[in-house]
Each structure stands twice: as structure tokens, then as C-alpha cells.
Image (cartoon, rainbow, N blue to C red):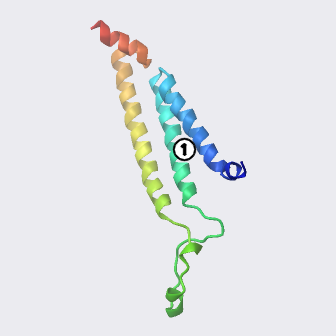
Amino acid sequence: MEFLLAKYNYWFYILIMMVGFYAMISKNNLVKKMIGVSIFQAAIILFYVSIGAKRGATIPIIEHGHDAVHHIDPTAYINPLPHVLMLTAIVVSVSTLGVALALISKIYAKYGTIEEDEINEQLTDV
């Protein structure tokens, strides 16, 4: 039980992820579905940023000098790779959201609604 309580941040990310997943699968409104996708993506980004952090560690900048290179302790540094990858993921998620909202706008212009069940009814009537 103590192990589960020690990892409270992971439970928080799972909770946020499930809120986004619930919005994606339960809502009929396309904008609400996209908000759910954005919440889901934010939870994943927070998770990856948190696994790159380490208590008591510092940024991975090595000082110049002859002795500094030979006495490097890799456990004293934060891994920058998850942070860098998540910057890319943020850009991709914003771009995806922009394209999806543009498509939803076109869907509204064509069908007069953004409710998924109403669009399906109009498609089956054709």
C-alpha cells in the first residue's frame, strides 16, 4: 500500500487520461471529443515529463576541464530526452487539434451539426 501511495503522481496521470478517454468515447459532440483527445494527450505528456525528472539531480551540462570529464556521475543528471520529445509532442498535438477543428468546421458547414449521431443519420438517409 505504501508503494501505491508513493507513486501518487502516476495515479493522477491515469485519472486525467481516463477523463480524456471517457470524453472521447462517450460524447457525441465532435468538439467535445477533440477536447477529450487533448486532455488525453496532455496526460501522456505530463507522464513522460515526470519520468524524466529526478530528485536531487541537475541539468546535464558538463563543465570544461581535464578532471571534470573523468569524474562524471551519470546518476547526478536529469535525462533530457523525454523533455525534448515532449516538446515535439506538444507541437504535434496543437497541430492535430487545429486540423481537427478545421475539419469539424467543414463538417458543420456541410451537415449543419457537429453531433455525431445526427451526422450518421444524414449519411444513412442518402
Which is more toward the observer, 89 or 2?
A: 2
Which amino acid type is marked by label 1?
Ala
Residue farthest right in this picture: 2
Write down the residue under mark 1.
43
Residue 4, given in percent of the width and then of the height, sits at: 67, 48
Which is more toward the observer, 93 or 124?
A: 124
Q: Is residue 71 left or right of residue 4?
A: left
Which is more toward the observer, 14 or 97?
A: 14
Residue 107 versus residue 99 in the image, above or below: above
Write the residue at 47% across / 28% down. 33
Write the residue at 49% across / 42% down. 41
Write the residue at 53% across / 28% down. 23
Residue farthest top in this picture: 125
Q: Is residue 118 left or right of residue 16?
A: left
Write the residue at 39% across / 20% down. 108
Q: Is residue 35 left or right of residue 111?
A: right
Q: For mark 1, does the 10 Å Cα neighbourhood hold few (<14), some (14 to 19), or many (20 or more) residues? A: many
Residue 58 versus residue 117 in the image, above or below: below
Residue farthest left in this picture: 126
Quarter containing the C terminus: top left
Residue 56 versus residue 27 in the image, above or below: below
Number of labels in the image equals 1
Q: Is residue 42 left or right of residue 101?
A: right
Residue 126 versus residue 72 in the image, above or below: above
Which is more toward the observer, 47 or 62?
A: 47
Residue farthest bottom in this picture: 66
Residue 8, given in percent of the width and then of the height, sits at: 67, 48
Residue 66, given in percent of the width and then of the height, sits at: 49, 93
Secondary structure type for disc 1: helix
Residue 97, given in percent of the width and then of the height, sits at: 43, 37
